[in-house]
Amino acid sequence: PPRDSIRRQRQMCIRDRVCTALVTGATSQLGRLVVGDLVARGHAVRALVRRPASESTERLRVGQRAALRSGQLVLVVGDVLEPDLGVKRSGQERLGEVTEIIHLARPRASDVAPPGALVRGLDGVAGLARRLGRRGRLRRLVVLSTTAVAGGYGGRFYEDWLEVGQPFPTEDGRAALELELRARASAARLPVVVARHAMLVGHSRTGHLECEAGLGKLLGLGPALSKLPTWVPVPGAGEGPRYVTVSPVDYVAAGIVELALSEAVEPGEEGATFCLADGAPPTLSELTDMLLDRVGGPEPGLRVPVDGKGPVGAAVQIAVRAGAGLAKALGKGPPGAVPFLLRRGDHDVTNARAVLEPAGISCPRLATYLDALYADYLSRRKRSSK
């Protein structure tokens, strides 16, 4: 039978199997969506939580009360940076039941993370994965990375690529590279799958996002622009190969769960890296025009090149880098929140589409939910002002 037919049959078989998944980073917005998707599919979940009394853990409890009562979801207190994941002996028994690991944990923007925290966290999870592998239980280890691994590469960056001589204007890109290098090294002995997300944005239906991401900086210009008279010319981004590649948080969650369960994925191979992002992103120029249109702002006047060409473009690049350095020094915002303008954002998504689209999972276009993102931004802004 055709290869696509075989793939569909294997995907149907995997949905009939009940797994026990360990989810690290389960209290983040992305983690809670992943947990909710797994629970809805009928799978057992072990959620690793660092702070059982935190507000984010309480959100997980509130959203999954029925699963907690039935024992389908179990909270395990631990920390990926600690030996044995910081899990006590009673919790270790729960981890011994795991068949899939979905590793989402990463330092929060408000945390002072130790050097190499991403790699150390993966090492801790890989240690558990090796123990489960020796028992013949582990079927999949999904590692979350980001498209920042492309750094300042000047063209389309393919899913299977890793080190192609790209420069790294920001530290988050270099950290993503180190994480994926370690993941690929582990793939020789473990069934590793790497999932990259682009600039994380809010839910494609509600617009809701709990962290301040790079796109939020651009949305923050909306209220000021809406107050300007329509005849006032404002600078806009110039045309060019500069794309704003985003990943709605709900699409990333659905994609990660499918990658963890689908038999169409061959873990541990070079092609087991998937980019969960919009395959047809708008240019920066198109995005600024869309934002101005939605807030009723004036039409863009002077088009400022942002591709680094010419004296104006070079000045823009220097200003963005200086702004990123100042934000980092002041502790304002996560790494990469400002300098997303430095990235070309042209990412191949062929591998992801081949697995996700047959399962009915596709990334919505930014234009279809930009209104929801902006409304959520205004709501958060109003609450913070109070």
Image (spheres, grey):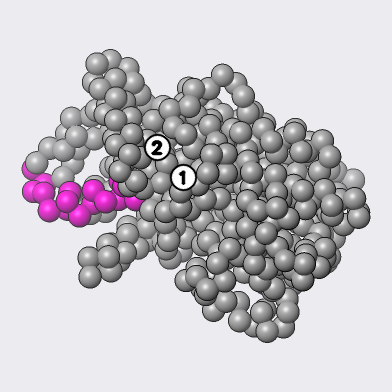
Query: Mark 1 or mark 2, which has the lower sequence index?
Result: 1
The answer to whether mark 1 and mark 2 are in CB contact below 8 A is yes
Q: Which mark is residue 340?
A: 2
Dominant SS in magenta: helix
Q: Residue at x 70, y 53 (%)?
A: 83
Magenta stretch, residue numbers: 214-231
User: Is residue 166 depicted above or below 339 in this figure?
Assistant: above
Q: Quadrant of residue 93?
A: bottom right
Q: Quadrant of residue 188?
A: top right
User: Is residue 374 depicted above or below 292 in this figure?
Assistant: below
Q: Residue at x 64, y 47 (%)?
A: 121
Task: Give the class, few, some or many, for how many residues have Cα within 10 Å of label 2's Cα (few <14, many ≥20).
Answer: many
Residue type at mark 2?
Answer: Phe
Residue 160 seen by the camera: yes
Q: Residue at x 91, y 54 (%)?
A: 136
Q: Which residue is mark 1?
A: 199
